[in-house]
Image (tube, rainbow, N blue to C red):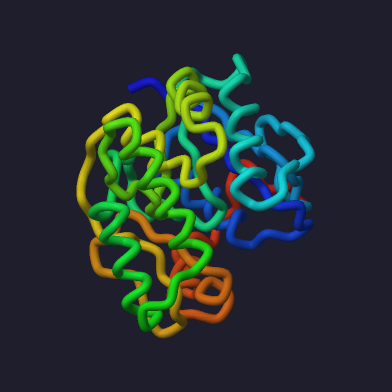
């Protein structure tokens, strides 16, 4: 199987412990050609390539879309690439990650607002905007906004960004626009400190607090003690 590039959109922080361990998990368990950082450059991490772009945009959705657009226009990237967040961890050897979705966007909206006692949030409003835009085009409304790596085709993503120029939730837009299908699977993100990694899990994602103070963060640090090839070596 052809090795693809991995792209991380990196925050401007000088220290990013989650990214360190995400890369360690990739180095051990996920074959790739090159790792690209778009945006920041944490100390002691040396990607294969870096695009030091300014993260422009009025909100995080616009910033991510702008970085994604630039990545997809980069002919030095493999035509298909893996998009990772810094809090994605590969727990077992995998050749690739199949497309995952979690139900539909309206189901996700109801789940969040039920948990909030019926109150809307900025996030659910963005989910509604995305749902309406997809329905207006006669497309599916599966919820691809789950916390796992996503394989993206550069040309297809540019088509999606052109079709939906002002709509957030690019994962849901891309997956439904190109009908990528996939596996209906619960999200793997762990938010709370007392929750541990499930037995047999292949993937996990963390929040800032669960990584720093939670059981899941402790488990990840214990599982990946060795430096990756993208860390600065002092010896």
Number of numbered labels in the structure image: 0
- Residue 185 seen anywhere in this rendered image of the structure: yes
* Position of residue 145 measured from the top left corner of the image (x, y, whole percent): 39, 51
On screen, residue 133 versus residue 65, left or right, reads left
Looking at this view, is 139 or 73 the one in front?
A: 139
* Position of residue 57 measured from the top left corner of the image (x, y, whole percent): 72, 44
Quadrant housing the N terminus: top left
Q: Quadrant of residue 198 in the image?
A: bottom left
Q: Quadrant of residue 34 in the image?
A: top right
> Which residue is at 47% across, 18% downward?
155
> Which residue is at 26% across, 60% downward?
107
* Position of residue 135 measured from the top left corner of the image (x, y, whole percent): 31, 39
Looking at this view, is 119 or 13 the one in front?
A: 119
* Position of residue 141 measured from the top left corner of the image (x, y, whole percent): 28, 44
> Which residue is at 29% across, 40% downward?
99
Question: In the current view of this chain or complex, which residue is farthest to the top?
Answer: 75
Q: Is residue 16 above or below residue 71?
A: below
Q: Is residue 116 above or below residue 197?
A: below
Looking at this view, is 147 or 19 the one in front?
A: 147
């Amino acid at each position: 199987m052809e090795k693809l590039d991995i792209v991380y959109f990196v925050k401007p922080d000088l220290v990013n412990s989650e990214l360190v361990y995400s890369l360690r998990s990739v180095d051990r368990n996920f074959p790739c050609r090159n790792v690209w950082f778009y945006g920041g450059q944490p100390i002691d991490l040396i990607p294969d390539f870096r695009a030091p772009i300014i993260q422009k945009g009025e909100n995080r959705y616009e910033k991510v879309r702008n970085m994604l657009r630039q990545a997809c226009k980069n002919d030095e990237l493999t035509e298909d690439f893996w998009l990772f967040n810094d809090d994605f961890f590969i727990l077992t050897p995998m050749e690739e990650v199949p497309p995952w979705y979690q139900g539909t966007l309206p189901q996700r909206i109801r789940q969040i607002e039920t948990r909030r006692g019926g109150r809307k949030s900025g996030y659910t409003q963005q989910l509604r905007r995305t749902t309406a835009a997809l329905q207006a085009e006669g497309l599916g409304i599966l919820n691809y906004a789950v916390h796992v790596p996503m394989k993206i085709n550069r040309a297809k993503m540019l088509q999606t960004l052109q079709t939906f120029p002002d709509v957030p939730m690019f994962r849901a837009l891309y997956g439904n626009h190109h009908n990528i299908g996939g596996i209906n699977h619960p999200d793997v993100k762990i938010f709370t400190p007392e929750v541990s990694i499930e037995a047999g899990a292949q993937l996990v994602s963390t929040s800032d607090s669960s990584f720093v103070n939670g059981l899941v963060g402790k488990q990840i640090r214990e599982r990946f003690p060795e430096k990756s090839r993208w860390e600065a070596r002092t010896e």
